[in-house]
Image (cartoon, rainbow, N blue to C red):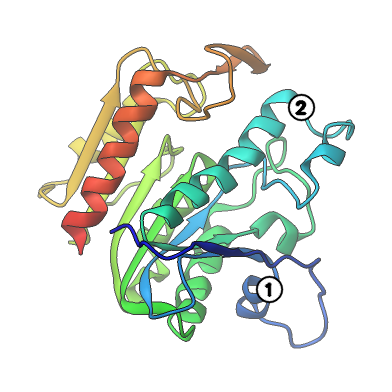
Amino acid sequence: MKHACALIAVLLLSSPSFSSGQTLRDLVAENHYSYIPSDQGNFPTLIAIPGCSGISSDNPTAEESNPQLSEGDLLFRRHYRYMAEKLKAEGFVVLLVNIHAAEGVLTACADPIDGERMAEYINEAVAWAIELPYVDPDKLHIIGWSMGGRGVLKWLDGPRSEATGVRSAIAVYPQCRGHTTLTIPMPILMLLGGSDDIAIPSVCEELVDSVPIKQHITVENYPGARHGFDVQDAPPMLESGNGKTVGYQKEAAEASWVAILQFLTMSE
């Protein structure tokens, strides 16, 4: 799906303004980063939802001195933009939704954004995206990491019934606790770390096991992989507070990338 033409990224980000009558769709339009493969044509598109650390700004160096951001936060914040660039290079538009900015918070690890609220943002992002000239409205996909993966699962549980054109959903080390259904026929890919002590993989596997008909669900569990196993700048293990850990694992990162691309191709 690669394109020979020069790739460009249009980066859009603004602070939320909670003016009277402003909708979640307005907030999505004002608070996102857009990665567009070319100025010609329309493309399959991913609505991308970050984890609790949020997304790095256009000046990530300045964030390094912010006492509110831990080393782990900084790694994850950069990671989501890195992944968006990789997906753009494969011919996808990526709309990286800065829900944190829309909600007026820098990070949400200590006080997570409600899953239902994130699901509402995702639904509005889909409705907004299908109107964009560079988006193929019949080839939409959703991807979320960690807390963002939890939002994806909540979206699948609820408001997704109103969405059109969405072909598949991907949850990367999602937080599955509290979810009870995954019965819709939409293809779903879950990528789990076998040694994840933040988003416990067994909880996700129990959720999948409880689904009577699960042919639409693909689960990849990478043995020994920690939370954030695909965060390429992270060390193999980093303490993230409260006895929890994150860490990069090369084998899991490479395998999960292949799984994502294959899944998206099959979902087309």
Q: Residue at x 57, y 16 (%)?
A: 245
Image position of 159 with respect to 119: above or below: below
Q: Quadrant of residue 130?
A: bottom left
Q: To which residue does mark 1 refer? A: 27
- Mark 1, residues whose alpha carbon is within 10 Å: few (<14), some, or many (≥20)? many
Image position of 54 with respect to 28: above or below: above
Q: What amino acid is found at the position of numbered circle 2 in the picture?
A: Ser
Q: Residue at x 32, y 57 (%)?
A: 2
Which is more toward the observer, 229 or 243?
Answer: 229
Image position of 196 with respect to 219: above or below: above
Which is more toward the observer, 74 or 42?
Answer: 42
Q: What amino acid is found at the position of numbered circle 1 in the picture?
A: Leu
Q: Residue at x 43, y 79 (%)?
A: 40
State if disc 1 and disc 2 touch (CB < 8 Å).
no
Q: Quadrant of residue 187?
A: bottom left
Which is more toward the observer, 23 or 16?
Answer: 16
The percent coordinates of residue 9 (x first, y second) are 58, 63
Query: Mark on residue 70?
Result: 2
Which is more toward the observer, 159 or 169?
Answer: 169
Q: Secondary structure at mark 1?
A: helix
The percent coordinates of residue 36 (x first, y second) are 50, 67
Tag 1 or tag 2, which sits nearer the N-term?
Answer: 1
